Amino acid sequence: MYESTLPWPSDFTARMTGWLGDAAPAFLAALARRDIGLRLNPLRGPLAELLARLPWATDPVPWAAEGRVLREPAPVGTHIYHTAGAYYIQDPSAMAAAVLLDPQPGEWILDLAAAPGGKSTQIAARMQNQGVLIANEVVRRRAAVLAMNLERLGVTHALVLNETPDRLTGRWESLFDAVLLDAPCSGEGMFSRDAQAIRDWSVPVVRGNAHRQRTILEQAAPLVRPGGRLVYATCTFAPEEDEGVIADFLAGHPEFELAIPPALPGFQPGRPEWCGAPEVLRRAVRLYPHTGPGHGHFLARLQRQAEPQPAPEDRRPWPGMEVPGRVLRLYRDAVGAALTAAPPESGLYLSQDDYLYVTPLDPDLWHGLRVLRPGWWVASQRNREVYPDHALAMALRPAEARATVTLTPDDPRLAAFLQGGFWPDTGPEGFVLVTVDGFPLGWGKRGGGRLRSRYPVHLRQAWRPEDAE
C-alpha cells in the first residue's frame, strides 16, 4: 500500500469533518492510502489452492471469503496468473456489493452498470456459472472491456449488453431474481487513485449525481421480480447520493423495504442524520477506509415484498438451438476434436457475424437489444470452416482438452505464446490448450513440427520472466 499526495477539495474535507467529528482525521488519512485488493476466482479452483499459489503476502478481506489485500505493492497486473484469470484486481470495499446481493446458482441476475466487470465476475463465480447473468454497460467502449474480463475469468453463462436502463425496463419487467445497480457517482472513495475525480468534485456535482441516481434506480426497480432483491451501491460518502437517494426511493415504492444486512466485520450502519433521512436508513451499509481495507462504499439491499412463491417454470437455461445443419456439423467436428467430451450444443446460437455462442437466454428475449455477446463465445466460422474460440479455452480445465501444453511462469515459451509466436513441437497435429501451472491461457495449434500461438491479436503483450516475481 502507499499514499496519495493529492489534496482533497476543501468543501469535501469540511463536510466529512463536520459529519465524522473526532474520526475525521483518521478517515482523511486513510483515504490517502491505496490498498491493492485481489479477488481470487473460484472458477479456477478451490480458494485455499489459489491462495497457496499467490507469490505475495496478503491479508483477508473480512467481508468476502475470496478477497485478499496485498501487504506490499506488487506487479499483480502484469503477472501471468492475472492473464490466466486466477484473480481479479478489485478494491476490497467493492467486493461487498456481491456479498450483499447474495447471488445463487441458477438465478437470473442483472448487473445494470457492470463495467469494467469486477462485480459481474464476482457474481458469476458465486453463481458457479449456473443460471443467467446479464452484464450491461451503457458506454460501448467500457462494455468491450467488460466482455474481455468476463472471458478472462472463464464466465460461461453471461450475456454482455450495451443498453440504457430504460430500454431494458421496457423489455424485461419483473424478470430477475436480483439486480445490482452500481450507480455512477461522485467517486469520493476513488480520490487516492483518480485525480480527475478530485478535480471534478463539487457540491453541485454531488447533487447532480443524486438526481441521475434517482432516475436510474426508478428504472431498475421494475426489473426485479416480486420477492426479488435490488442492491444499490456507490463508491462515495456523500449522503445526498447514498441515504438520500434510498430514502426518496422508499417513499415512492412501498412494495420495497430496506433489508437488514448481514452482521459482517467492517460493515458500519447508514447515517440518516447526515441528510435528514428516516431512521430505517441505518439498515444501509457504509464502509470506510479507516475502519477496514479498501477506499469505501455505500450499499443498500432493497427487497421487493411478495408472498412466497416458487420460481417460474421457465426459469432455466434456454435448451434450443439456432444453427444451420452444415455449420453444426463443422462445429461438432472442429470443436469436438479439441475437447475430451462432446462440445456444448444446448443453447447454441450462430450470430450474424458468424460467431457461435452458447446462450443461456431464449433469443426472443434479447433480439432487438444491443447485445455485444449473447453468451459464451465457443467458436467462429471463417471461410466455411469452424475454429474453437479463445473464450472456450479460457473456461476449460486441462482435463477437458484433448491436448495440452503446461508452461511455468519462467518458461521462455510463454513470451512466444503471448506475442503470437511459435516454438518447435513434433506432437500430434491439432488444437492444443496452452496453460500456465494448470490455468488456461488460450489455444495453440500444432502442425508442421511446431506449435503456433492462437492468442488473440488484441490481447498480445510483451512478457518477461521477471514479471512472474
Image: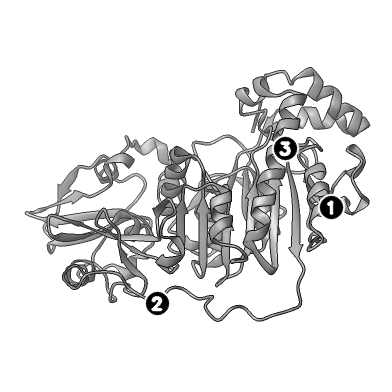
Q: Which badge, 2 or 3, comes first in the chain's sequence?
A: 3
Q: Of helix, strand and loop, which one carries label 2?
A: loop
As measured in the structure, the alpha-carbon distance from the residue carrying label 2 to the one carrying label 3 is 42 Å
Q: Is residue 159 visible?
A: yes
Near-viewer residue (211 or 282):
211
Which residue: 75% across, 58% down? Answer: 302
x and y percentages locating residue 309 in the rendered image = 69, 80
Confirm or deny contact between disc 1 and disc 3 (CB under 8 A). Answer: no
Nearest to viewer (mark 2 / mark 3): 3
**Left or right: where 449 falls relative to 245:** left
**Which quarter of the image is occupied by the C terminus?**
top left
Residue under label 1, please give it.
251
Decide: few, some or many residues near mark 3? Use Cα within 10 Å; few <14, some 14-19, many ≥20: some
Q: Is residue 65 visible?
A: no
Which residue: 26% across, 45% down? Answer: 417
Vertical arrangement, residue 246 with respect to residue 309, above or below = above
Residue under label 3, please give it.
211
Residue under label 2, please give it.
319
